[in-house]
Image (cartoon, rainbow, N blue to C red):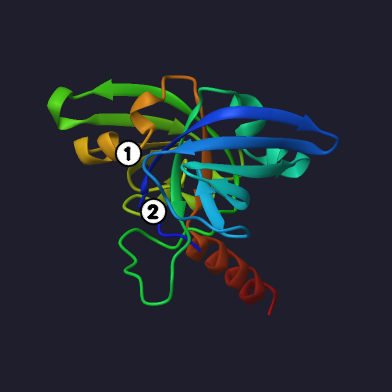
Amino acid sequence: MFSGIVEGKARVVEVKDTHRGRRAVWEFEGDINFRKGQSISLDGACLTVEEYEGNRATFFLSDETLRRTKFGEVLQPGYVSNYERSLRVGDRLDGHIVLGHVDGVARLAEVIDYGEDGLEWVVEVPEGLERYVAPKGSVALDGTSLTVNSVNGNRFRIRLIPHTLHVTALGLRREGDPLNFEADVVARYVERLMGFLKDE
């Protein structure tokens, strides 16, 4: 489990195709003490450390992960991802509960530049996922916990403050780029419970 508070950026330095997926090496900012088997969020997808040395770590992405996330489209050397280590008991939850289970691939439909005041994004989610997006609710885009400002159909607006743009890789994203989207897990449970109540 994660909080959506990105720790930093990591660059893909190597990608190898396997029979049922891809094995990729990311180079992280600084010297991070990972361990084998540890869960790391890369652009919001929960991946497991296979090997780690210095500031590089190797991860296996199954064909299912490649199909459900944007990595099937963007995973190549030079690509920059957000990363976050999993929460420990007692950690502050400064963002919101992020599971690292990507619901779908959204698209960055429009970028509005406010100069030193950051950016505003218009994001388009796949059909069927818009029901989980609510004004002033939370979403995770590329693993980053963000607040929804407004919703119009399957599009919503968010603001990216200068700090977010500095710490994360979101400032590198351009109009048309894919984004890993995870809805707030609370919205999913509410929907499930309402379905049970409706059946009673």
SS class, disc 2: strand
Residue 68's place in the image compared with 135, above or below, is: above
On the question of residue 126 being in view, the answer is no
Residue 133's place in the image compared with 94, above or below, is: above
SS class, disc 1: strand
Residue 170's place in the image compared with 109, above or below, is: below
Q: Nearer the viewer, residue 103 or 87?
A: 87
Q: Nearer the viewer, residue 151 or 37?
A: 37
Horizontal relation, residue 133 to residue 75: left or right? left
Residue on which disc 2 sits? 138
Q: Amino acid at mark 1?
A: Ile
Furthest-front residue in this view: 54
Image coordinates of residue 66 in percent, x first then y, are 70, 37
Q: Residue at x 46, y 42 (%)?
A: 55
Q: Nearer the viewer, residue 115 or 2?
A: 2
Image coordinates of residue 92 in percent, x first then y, are 31, 69
Q: Residue at x 43, y 19 (%)?
A: 175
Q: Earlier in the sequence, mark 1 or mark 2?
A: 2
Q: Residue at x 33, y 28 (%)?
A: 171
Residue on which disc 1 sits? 158
Quadrant of the rendered structure where residue 95 is?
A: bottom left
